[in-house]
Amino acid sequence: MAEIKTKKTNQPVDDFLDSIDDERKKKDCCAILELMKQITGEEPKMWGESIVGFGDLHYKYASGREGDWLLVGFSPRKQNLSLYLTCDFQAEPDLMRRLGKFKTGKACLYIKTLEDVNVEALKELIEKSIWAVRDRRIRP
């Protein structure tokens, strides 16, 4: 069985954020960091070389595959900011309409800038993601 390569590290989050060259992206990351810290009540940790994560969860599938992952997190990618959220985006049509400009993947929300989204809707989406995972309605 393949092992997850992205694991929690001891790399300082502040050092990672300070290394972001794009000032707008750095500012957005700092704002998302504070937002996720406030919502989760957790301290941020680095996962791999480029993901800032909050909280820990251990999962185990019926197949026997298991691992550890972050509750929520984000990463400044070249094209956009990736927010790692484990919720069913399609189950929240009203919330997604309010959110603004974004794209989604299976468990990622992609935004160009924080300015492109409604921050209150984003907070609600992060909260729903945490609830879904903690309530085991959705697995990472």
Image: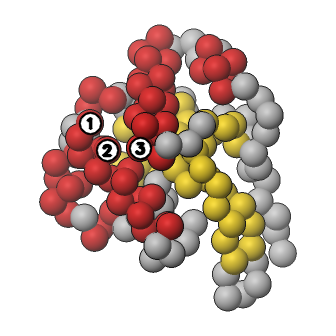
The quadrant where residue 49 appears? top right
Question: Residue at position x 37%, y 67% from top?
Answer: 88
Amino acid carrying mark 1 in the image: Val
Mark toward the viewer: 3 or 2: 3
Question: Whole-percent x and y of residue 130?
Answer: 45, 58
- Density class for disc 3 (Cα within 10 Å; few <14, some 14-19, many ≥20) is some
Which image quadrant is residue 105 in? bottom left
In the rendered structure, which amino acid carries the disc numbered 2? Lys
- CB atoms at circles 2 and 1 under 8 Å apart? yes
Name the secondary structure under disc 3. Answer: helix
Q: Which residue position holds label 2?
A: 123
Circle 1/circle 3 CB separation < 8 Å: no
As measured in the structure, the alpha-carbon distance from the residue carrying label 2 to the one carrying label 1 is 6 Å
- Of the pair 127 and 7, the residue shown nearer to us: 127
Residue 79 visible in image: no
Q: Earlier in the sequence, mark 1 or mark 3?
A: 3
Q: Which mark is first along the chain, 2 or 3? A: 3
In 3D space, how far apart are the residues under numbered discs 1 and 3 (Cα atoms)?
13 Å
User: As drawn, is 62 to the left or to the right of 90?
Assistant: right
Location of residue 37 in the rendering, given as x and y in whole percent from the top left corner = 49, 37
- How far apart, in angstroms, are the residues tagged by discs 3 and 2? 8 Å
Residue contact at pointers 3 and 2, CB within 8 angstroms:
yes
Residue at 26% across, 32% down: 116
**Label 3 is placed on what type of residue?**
Ile
Residue at label 1?
119
| Relative image position of residue 137 (x, y in whole percent) | 45, 76
Q: Which mark is residue 136?
A: none
Taking the image as drawn, is residue 40 in sight? yes
For mark 3, what is the residue?
39
